Amino acid sequence: MKTEVGHWLGRPVLLKSVDTTRSDDEQARMRQRLTAEIQSMARMDTQHVQFLGFYITPNRDVCCITEFAEGGTLRHLLDNRNVLERLTWGLEKIALAIDIASALAAMHALKPALIHRNVKASKVLLTSEKIAKLSGFGVAREKSFEYDMASGVSDLQWSAPELLLDGEDYNEQVDVYAFGVLLTELDTGAIPFATEMALMQKEELRAKITAGVIRPKLSSMCPLVIRNIVAQCLQQDPRLRPRSDKMLAMLQDAQIVLENEGGNDIP
């Protein structure tokens, strides 16, 4: 895929299009993925998704127009230890979590629901004001089992157990699980299961996640109210996880608790 910075209506934007220097087969795959991404984002009506529009290029290909995120990705922010140490759950972290949860709640409220399937810090873009915008809609799918929903899913560390089971039906609750993993990223700054990935084979880690034996860790300083939300999102049984709209309400309630307690609701 070719990505470049451009201008649209007097503002800097990101332009994503098919890389015509690639082989015909690669171009066809890019075209299919980009079209699916545009169709998914076009269904959204929320300030927390970066989509602006699209246009047809002179060679009859499609070009996607998205906001230019001056703040980079959330993953990039978390990798900066000096910046990470200044972020608190009482202020910045809870606001970012609410931004992301708002986008997921809007996706899941669509009829049929839109499942992102790739929720993680590297797919969250930040504006200069540190407002979080959800990206990475290339593998999003409508809630339908008439086609292969198992193709192109998220990386192992963020994948819900039912998503890792071959041929297993799943729904939008896989995004709730992945969001729980993302909250551990926000809390610790670390890539989930980084230590385990270095010590065990991928299939062993996959088996332990699927069996519910292992989950990503939180820091000892994580507020109790956040710890409780993460525990609910990471439930083994998807029916026990909160719906995304409930998850959003829980975070908004947590924001009030953290503001009242100065972000020090530590277990």
Image (cartoon, grey):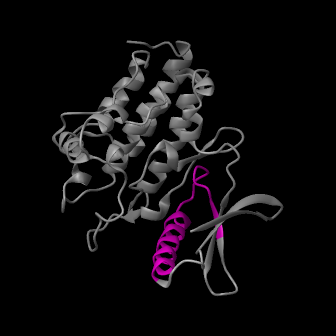
Q: Residue at x 52, y 71 (%)?
A: 34
Q: In the rendering, at what x and y percent does residue 80 appear?
A: 59, 31
Is 43 within the magenta? yes
Number of marks in picture: 0
Can residue 7 be seen from the camera position used here? yes
Q: Nearer the viewer, residue 203 or 34?
A: 203
Q: Residue at x 46, y 27 (%)?
A: 187
Q: Which of 237 and 155 is in front in this view?
A: 155
Q: In the rendering, at what x and y percent does residue 152 appear?
A: 36, 63
Q: Quadrant of the C terminus?
A: top left
Q: In the rendering, at what x and y percent does residue 85 appear?
A: 58, 21
Question: What's drawn in magenta, residue-wise?
Answer: 25-53
Q: Which residue is drawn at 32% across and 36% down?
A: 198
**242 sits to left or right of 263:** left
Q: Which residue is drawn at 30% across and 68% down?
A: 144
Q: In which quarter of the image is residue 214?
A: top left
Q: Quadrant of residue 177?
A: top left
**183 sits to left or right of 83:** left
Is 144 within the magenta? no
Q: Which of 169 and 124 is in front in this view?
A: 124
Q: In the rendering, at what x and y percent does residue 206 appear?
A: 23, 45
**176 sits to left or right of 93:** left
Q: Residue furthest left?
A: 211
In the image, residue 208 above or below residue 88? below
